[in-house]
Image (tube, rainbow, N blue to C red):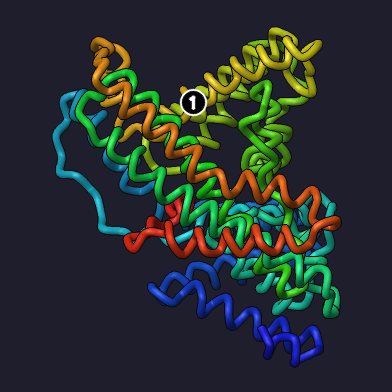
Amino acid sequence: MAAYWLLGRKPFQNVMLLAASYIFYGYVHPWFCILLGISTVVDYYTALGMERFGHRKKQMLQISLISNLGMLGVFKYFNFFADNFQALFLKLGFDFPPITYSIYLPVGISFYTFQTLSYTIDVYWGNLKARRNFIDFALFVTFFPQLVAGPIERATHLLLQVETPRKWNRDLFMSAWPLMIQGYLKKMVIADNMAIFADKVYLMHQPSIALFLAGTIAFAIQIYMDFSGYTDIARGSARLLGFELMDNFKSPYLAISPSDFWRRWHISFSSWIRDYLYIPLGGSRAASSFHFFCILFVTMGLAGLWHGASWHFVFWGLYHGVILFIYHRLGKGGRWQPAGAIGTLSAWSVMICLTLFGWMLFRAPTMAWLGRILFDGVRLDLSDVPVAVYILVMGLLYSLPLLVMGWTDRFWTKWPVLRTAVYTICVLTICVFSREAQYDFIYFQF
């Protein structure tokens, strides 16, 4: 970081950041960089081709889509589709050996694929000019703070910052540290410790209803703190280098409807799905309820599949598509707001229950496992109630420093000493409660 700011001039800084990003991404598996480089080169030249050969604009976009989605399909979904096609043919009476390969999933391939595709699509639509500076474009694709788990940035936001000379900004620099401390607290204290409870419950053959609900709540806390924690660390790291990344979360568990949830959860992804899939498919101008349902079904099914090559992710996406459709048909979609405090509380209560059921689909090891829990007889065991209560209490205790941090930030201008003390305690909390066997960020697998 010191060398970065001492370089002073933007071209040198960008070259350094580009090299650092490739070292960062290829540190464990250097061959991952080949895919990243191919995606960068293809989209750089196809965008230029759209402007130079206007009559072949559509073909250039198709090259970008086929190459990027082709790599994503091979490295992330090949075995999934091969296994399912084999199972289908076996049921039809055809027997042939499985065609599967030991394929490493490149970390963050779903994220940078969507990010670079947004560039070529925007150029195709005429919303953006193709860039001539290859270094600047390559840095936009590979910028290491958000490369492996987002936010999924748009060229109209991040690429413009890459191209703009950056000057030392003390306020931006100082605001980075609290954000990073908050992120490490979310991940290393809250998410990693709640993961123990969630994993124990979801590894059981048939947990009681009390344990199952407590384990699901533990997972809901885990996945939010894990993913938003990464975003905080990424945004803080970017600020240290003079960049401002978009905020990816806005209190999603306070949502009062499915539409409200997706405006608050993984905002960069949900807005990408809206702008590049839902709207082009005609979701905003559907001619009938059936047409609207089909568009939501396809959009959210693909959104679920983006999260992983497994049926429970697909069903999670389809489930959200169904509840989005139901709320819209009831007149509670879009920017709907319930009347009064009681109405808001009721709407929130319903939505948090729907969200938790969705997390059951998301976290279940298999759909058969979840079906056994929900439909083969709910097991009641009062002896598990104290354990379930213990899990929930520990979730609250682990989250307490974060709640205090949020409260302190409102008054830090009046009492800066208090803010310093709270953040010092948070750093000590990270040191004391972080686990030796740390968990990877959940969204690294996507």
| Residue 227 horizontal side relative to residue 310, left or right | right
Residue 132 lies, in percent from the top left, at 78, 75
Q: Nearer the viewer, residue 255 or 323?
A: 255
Residue 307 lies, in percent from the top left, at 48, 43
* Residue 282 in view of the camera: yes
- Residue under the point 76% across and 70% down: 174
Q: Is residue 348 above or below residue 363?
A: above
- Residue under the point 63% across and 79% down: 18
Q: Is residue 216 above or below residue 39?
A: above
Local packing at callout 1 (Cα closer than 10 Å; few below 14, some 14-19, many 20+) is: some
Label 1 is placed on what type of residue? Leu
Q: Nearer the viewer, residue 180 or 163?
A: 180
Residue 48 lies, in percent from the top left, at 75, 67
Residue 418 lies, in percent from the top left, at 72, 58
- Residue under the point 44% across and 70% down: 32
* Residue 116 in view of the camera: no
Number of numbered discs on residues: 1
Q: Secondary structure at mark 1?
A: helix
Q: Nearer the viewer, residue 90 or 290?
A: 290
- Which corner quadrant of the image does residue 162 belong to? bottom right
Q: Quadrant of the N terminus?
A: bottom right
| Residue 428 horizontal side relative to residue 327, left or right | left
Location of mark 1 (residue): 356
| Residue 405 horizontal side relative to residue 126, left or right | left
- Residue under the point 73% across and 16% down: 344
